[in-house]
Amino acid sequence: MLKIQPLKGMKDYLPDETALREYALNTIHEVYRRHGFSRITTPMLEEIGNLTGSECGDNLNLIFKVLKRGDKLSETLASGRTEALADMGLRYDLTLPLARFYAANRHLLPLPFKVIQMDRAFRAERPQKGRMREFMQCDIDIIGDDSIHAETELIHVTAKALSALGFENFIVLVNDRRLLNGLLVSFGFSQESLPALCLAIDKADKIGVEGVRAELVQKGHNHEAVDALCEFLFRDNLTPENAADRLADKASAESLVCIIRDVHALAGDKYRVAYHPSLVRGQGYYTGAVFEIICPSFSGSIAGGGRYDGMIGKFTGQAIPAVGFSIGFERVCALLSEKGFATSAPVKIAVLYREEHDFAYVLKKADDLAQHHTVTVFRQAKKLSKQLETLEAMGFASVAFADREEIKVLGRYNASEKTTPPAHGTAYIK
Amino acid sequence: MLKIQPLKGMKDYLPDETALREYALNTIHEVYRRHGFSRITTPMLEEIGNLTGSECGDNLNLIFKVLKRGDKLSETLASGRTEALADMGLRYDLTLPLARFYAANRHLLPLPFKVIQMDRAFRAERPQKGRMREFMQCDIDIIGDDSIHAETELIHVTAKALSALGFENFIVLVNDRRLLNGLLVSFGFSQESLPALCLAIDKADKIGVEGVRAELVQKGHNHEAVDALCEFLFRDNLTPENAADRLADKASAESLVCIIRDVHALAGDKYRVAYHPSLVRGQGYYTGAVFEIICPSFSGSIAGGGRYDGMIGKFTGQAIPAVGFSIGFERVCALLSEKGFATSAPVKIAVLYREEHDFAYVLKKADDLAQHHTVTVFRQAKKLSKQLETLEAMGFASVAFADREEIKVLGRYNASEKTTPPAHGTAYIK
């Protein structure tokens, strides 16, 4: 017997769940599109060397690798090079494929290129707390704009998409990797220790400030430097201006101030924006501003992104500025589902036929109704009243019979149980 | 340097190509939906045993297998069981995942269950003649209806979807595996030889009748039996009734006659339906009717399907009738693209700003316009006339300036180059 459950960390979506996902996807897409972003599509699979050579931080260990095939597999097995068994892998995000796409197609693309990706990615995470191994992301990116207007525009459009889905009172947190790195150096930490330091700081939301402090000390960092850093970084009222006081180069702090000022002006009273000095975002490829959106009702972020000016250059040999923002679609859908989302499905009519009817005629009758309604045909059951109950439970508003003129409106939609035609579509009954 | 081309047999889709794909997908989806089918979603990955244990014919050799991870990989490598290096694989079609989905969720689903799947599948084919290794399929299936009405309905709705995309004069070819098997036995071939015989017969479109004849003789089949079979099966005017004359059990031929009669009545003069006695369809899991749609302008089918009453039972232990029809989305898009498809994009407006402008104000101005148009902001270039040409080439109909009232209609859209507001949206200019 074959296994009936989906693989762990992956999910089947029933019709109602799929309808919610489609609604959310279409809503987000429409906002992105209206603001002049264009959608592209890239393959799920990438060359293994592209995936492993791209500063993806923790994701490096989470790649689903695809086994070589045929002679190449035999050769690799014979050679004993077991680290070379895979030649491709499932992408862990949409940013790396975008960078490759841009490098391959840049002669065909406008500059700046404002791009939408809404598609699946895969990470071999230990399944936990609703973390999926297969998940959708909805990304917008601006390639070829080195000004902070790109950051502001992405935050603005992403916030619009979330608002269109009914999200309110969310908070956009912003930081800048250069500012954070500058601060770390100003507290006496070495340049080489910065990536590991950032990884530890990034965990503050999970393990708390004390946890970060303990981890850093345990890793051999100077106790006093760690204390001073944590006190500074995790205090409540730190502003970019305060942070900049410790640095000679104040450019990154000034950029942050501008982004926050503009986003604040755009947000009105719909959402908030705040400097979050310890925000890191996991990816190793971020080079400047980083940002995420959190929701008061949900632990963890519902969107995240940042500037990655170095990545496309890895494909082209020439640096091209880029910045992206990604909506965590699975979390958004989980929240919509908790709020009790219901699709406003168009009126559904069931056309019942019996064995002796001309089936081509039955389908033609259904077609005529389908111009204005969702219509489907079913064989009439022996126990009609039971079948009508089932159809009603399935969301059918009314029933037509292959050999009769009228349409019967089902009880739930018509308390008096009269046999009356619905407002629309009567002209289409033969 | 990382590799910039997509993996072989996989493709990047540019904005225009993605727009065509979205249009085709939405058009097909809308037809399916109106006829009472509901969409589900299943994971791209399946348990390796499900993929290899499911009578998938040639596809068995085309599975992209995913390498085990962590300790399980080490253990397998240490044990030398190199055939067990993979624990999951990318699906090669949407039918197997549907059967698993139905088995897992049947207590939550109506009977009959009319279901839509529009999603990607993967096959490690040798890349050739536009055969993709990653491709979209658009499937409808009816589960739990053992009558031939299910076949007729699927053919009807699939034909409607193709018509909605502008396809005309296509031909629906139908056959029945039981009828074909009965014919083969009636010519003296053994029950055990049927699968291999069918594989050879299936190639007739590629290698010709003589090729089939040669292959069968070469495989050691009786020369006279092969000649008699080929003469019968590939003659021009064979009808299901003629075929049934050779068989004791005429049920499958009678079913075919009914399907053809009903589909013919539904087709009118839009498309044709014909008995194709040598039609096999590659999958090993088909148990009854099989069908495909061919297009005069295209060699190869643009849709294919059939009845697979045995597959769901492999998951549940209890046979459940099922029939499906799948549109070959990649071929359909290739044909649409050849026909010169153009999306009717909504009017696009570019809002140009300069460095000194308040960027939050610029985005607000764009938002107001975005209620009626696709709007995007760009920094104003030093050479404005050159920038306007570029914007026009990108499909922008007009340009607004952050600090001016009017909207400039671009040359291509207004031969007289007057600076006039477009018909809509003027009320939204500040």
Image: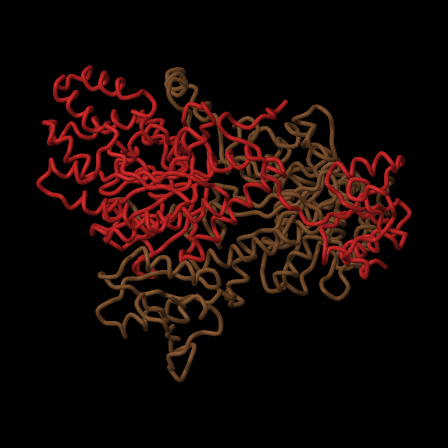
Chain colours: A brown, B red
Residue found at x 22% / y 61%: A356
Residue found at x 33% / y 28%: B61
Q: Which of B46/B279 is in front?
A: B279
Q: Position of residue B384 (x, y in %)?
A: 88, 38
Left or right of B333? Residue A38 is: right
User: Can residue B299 be seen in the rendering of this structure?
Assistant: yes
Give above or below for A337 relative to A200: below
Q: Which of B13/B181 is in front?
A: B181
Q: Position of residue B93 (x, y in %)?
A: 38, 39
User: Can residue A201 be seen in the rendering of this structure?
Assistant: no
Q: Position of residue B211 (x, y in %)?
A: 27, 18
Where on the picture, by quarter, is residue A168?
bottom right
Left or right of B34? Residue B426 is: right
Q: Which of B33/A362 is in front?
A: A362
Residue found at x 66% / y 28%: A103
Q: What number of labels is visible?
A: 0
In the image, farthest residue toward the bottom: A416
Left or right of A306? Residue B112 is: left
Give above or below for B214 relative to B203: above
Quarter of the image with the C terminus of chain B is bottom right
Quarter of the image with the N terminus of chain B is top right
Q: Which of A279/A335 is in front?
A: A335
Where on the picture, by quarter, is residue B207?
top left
Left or right of B103? Residue A79 is: right
